[in-house]
Image (cartoon, grey):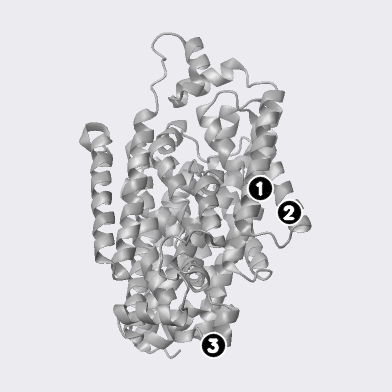
């Protein structure tokens, strides 16, 4: 793909901005670990929510989504659309609880909620397992996606370009910590969305317009259900759809907003900002971002469906569409937006992984009691090492969506105990340890014993086995001492009837507040979000009546969410 002076100028200016932000925020970030990892807990909802969206908007996501569309049609996106239930639950039930816990990382929660050596072992294990192994897998697939994009767009070697991009992200992340992450994420999100919408417009024009696109997609796959938002009953994809909605979302490790989502909740100014920011993330993540990618995926079926390279790797269709469709000027914007999306994910995972390894392993077990500045220096060194780990992992990967599935199956079943630990006093550290071990063991066993089993079936079996294991272990092991539970209850006020025994011990004035209102808001938000998602989708494929009904239902449900919040609207101070 040829790039003119204007194109390269856009890419260059973005790189300058990212480095300048790193220098500008470096002094603020270096004051303490709270500054470096949670921005002094002073983020507004719109900034932290946009940062969540930008982090999950990497170079891998457009490629993976367009690839899913090419393979399974629009309904193939239920692989990740089901997770909206988890993210909305996190917004209405768990965001305020994370903000109340007031820690630097979500792993500190473990030794507040649990007790003794099992809690310490769990915290240390997760710091290394998630901070290094799982983090490397995520960064690996993001780097793989970026290398695919660069390989499809340019004839020059892709490794130097990828390396330069990584160096820029590493520099500003190491210098400015989480402050640099969230500030650059805001600009990165705007650029990435602008680029993806522009590409969708040019791709639709290439195939003759929106109406021609839908007609040609149906002609390319006669008898297929490519344009349906829900799979046909009786098909394997419909079975997968049912499994995702019944099992997939609550087995997710992030069902309570853990990891880098919790990091942003912990960085919020207050509970209101934490909840509203997470809600904005869910809305933008599921209703705003996917449709430009899906449209490009459909256009790639029409443009390249008969080619051998597309059949071998349909994820490349998105990148090739950039080269074939976009005029000068827009090419630079698109390349810069890919760099922005790529770096917005890399910077988060460097900072988040460093927070685990420094705050929850180095500081907790190896070198407690050092000055805050020493821990910030350690975090900067660890960030460099994590970059090397991610690069090494990228060299071993072949498929982006395949890496998604591996990561989700490895943690299937963990989500159940993550919900329960907030809502039920009886859960202990052994419950959580068991969920991790049993999920990983089931994943390995199924890979060896049934390598041809479908992913949804493996997911459901792994989740069922893990859930059974951790429930048995919970009742077979000693509960957390009452004084620890009482301290947690008074600090967090989880509100669930599962804490009634502890509330009775707490005495008058410490009664259960209840979570019925939060669950009602959650249910309404599900209807509003999916109604909007479906309404926009039906409108784009030319089904105006269905679109109107979905959007009307979404409006009514959204109004209900608005009215169910305190004072008719959420009070973000």
- Judging from the image, what secondary structure is the residue with disc 2 in? helix
Residue extending farthest right = 449
- Judging from the image, what secondary structure is the residue with disc 1 in? helix
For residue 297, above or below residue 33: below
Which quadrant is the C terminus positioned in?
Answer: top left
Residue highlighted by disc 3? 307
- For image coordinates 48% across by 49% down, the residue present is 30
Badge 1 crowding class, 10 Å Cα cut-off, few under 14, some 14 to 19, many 20 or more, is many
- Using the image, tell me which numbered label, if any, was put on residue 446: 2
Q: In which quarter of the view is residue 18 placed?
A: bottom left
Whole-percent x, y for residue 488 in the image: 51, 24
Badge 3 crowding class, 10 Å Cα cut-off, few under 14, some 14 to 19, many 20 or more, is few
Residue highlighted by disc 1? 461
- Give the mark nearer the N terminus: 3 vs 2: 3
- For image coordinates 51% across by 10% down, the residue present is 505
- Judging from the image, what secondary structure is the residue with disc 3 in? loop
- Per the model, the C-alpha gap separating discs 1 and 3 is 37 Å
Which quadrant is the N terminus positioned in?
Answer: bottom left
Whole-percent x, y for residue 497 in the image: 47, 22
Whole-percent x, y for residue 350 in the image: 55, 56
Nearest the viewer among 309 and 241 is 241
For residue 76, above or below residue 423: below
Badge 2 crowding class, 10 Å Cα cut-off, few under 14, some 14 to 19, many 20 or more, is some
Residue 174 visible? The answer is no
- For image coordinates 57% across by 65% down, the residue present is 401
- Per the model, the C-alpha gap separating discs 2 and 1 is 9 Å
Nearest the viewer among 498 and 106 is 498
For residue 286, above or below residue 338: above
């Amino acid at each position: 793909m040829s790039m003119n002076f204007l194109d390269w100028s856009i890419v260059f200016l973005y790189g300058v901005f990212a480095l300048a932000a790193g220098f500008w925020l470096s002094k603020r970030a270096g004051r303490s670990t709270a500054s470096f990892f949670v921005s002094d807990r002073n983020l507004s909802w719109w900034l932290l929510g946009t940062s969540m969206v930008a982090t999950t908007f990497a170079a891998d996501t457009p490629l993976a989504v367009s690839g899913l569309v090419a393979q399974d049609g629009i309904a193939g996106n239920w692989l990740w659309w089901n997770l909206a239930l988890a993210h909305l639950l996190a917004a209405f039930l768990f965001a305020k609880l994370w903000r109340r816990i007031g820690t630097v990382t979500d792993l500190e929660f473990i030794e507040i909620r649990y007790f003794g050596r099992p809690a310490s072992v769990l915290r240390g294990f997760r710091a290394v397992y998630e901070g290094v192994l799982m983090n490397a897998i995520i960064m690996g697939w993001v780097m793989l996606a970026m290398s695919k994009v660069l390989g499809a767009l340019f004839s020059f070697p892709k490794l130097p370009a990828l390396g330069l991009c990584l160096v820029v992200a590493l520099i500003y992340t190491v210098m400015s910590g989480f402050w640099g992450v969230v500030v650059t994420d805001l600009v990165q999100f705007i650029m990435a969305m602008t680029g993806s919408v522009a590409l969708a417009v040019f791709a639709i024009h290439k195939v003759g317009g929106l109406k021609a696109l839908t007609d040609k997609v149906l002609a390319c796959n006669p008898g297929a259900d490519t344009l349906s938002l829900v799979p046909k009953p009786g098909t394997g994809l419909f079975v997968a759809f049912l499994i995702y909605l019944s099992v997939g979302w609550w087995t997710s490790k992030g069902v309570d907003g853990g990891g880098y989502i919790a990091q942003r909740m912990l960085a919020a100014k207050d509970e209101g900002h934490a909840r509203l920011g997470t809600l904005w993330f869910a809305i933008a993540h599921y209703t705003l971002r996917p449709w430009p990618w899906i449209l490009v995926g459909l256009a790639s079926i029409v443009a390249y469906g008969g080619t051998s390279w597309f059949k071998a790797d349909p994820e490349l269709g998105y990148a090739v569409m950039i080269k074939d469709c976009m005029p000068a000027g827009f090419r630079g914007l698109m390349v810069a937006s890919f760099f922005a999306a790529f770096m917005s994910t890399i910077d988060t995972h460097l900072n988040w992984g460093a927070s685990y390894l420094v705050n929850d392993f180095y500081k907790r077990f190896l070198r407690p009691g050092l000055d805050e500045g020493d821990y910030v220096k350690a975090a900067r060194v660890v960030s460099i090492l994590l970059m090397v780990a991610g690069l090494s992992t990228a060299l071993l990967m072949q498929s982006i969506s395949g890496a998604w599935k591996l990561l989700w199956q490895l943690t299937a079943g963990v989500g159940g105990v993550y919900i329960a630990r907030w809502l039920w006093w009886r859960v202990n550290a052994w419950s959580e340890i068991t969920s991790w071990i049993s999920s990983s063991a089931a994943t390995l066993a199924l890979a060896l014993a049934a390598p041809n089993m479908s992913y949804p079936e493996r997911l459901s079996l792994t989740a069922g086995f893990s859930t059974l294991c951790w429930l048995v272990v919970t009742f077979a092991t000693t509960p957390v001492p009452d004084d620890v539970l009482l301290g947690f209850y008074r600090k967090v006020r989880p509100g669930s009837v599962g804490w009634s025994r502890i509330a009775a011990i707490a005495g008058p004035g410490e009664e259960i507040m209840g979570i019925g209102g939060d669950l009602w808001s959650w249910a309404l938000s599900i209807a509003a979000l999916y109604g909007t998602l479906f309404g926009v989708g039906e409108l784009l494929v030319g089904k105006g009546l269905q679109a109107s009904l979905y959007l009307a239902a979404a409006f009514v449900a959204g109004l209900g969410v608005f009215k169910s919040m305190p004072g008719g609207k959420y009070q973000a101070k």
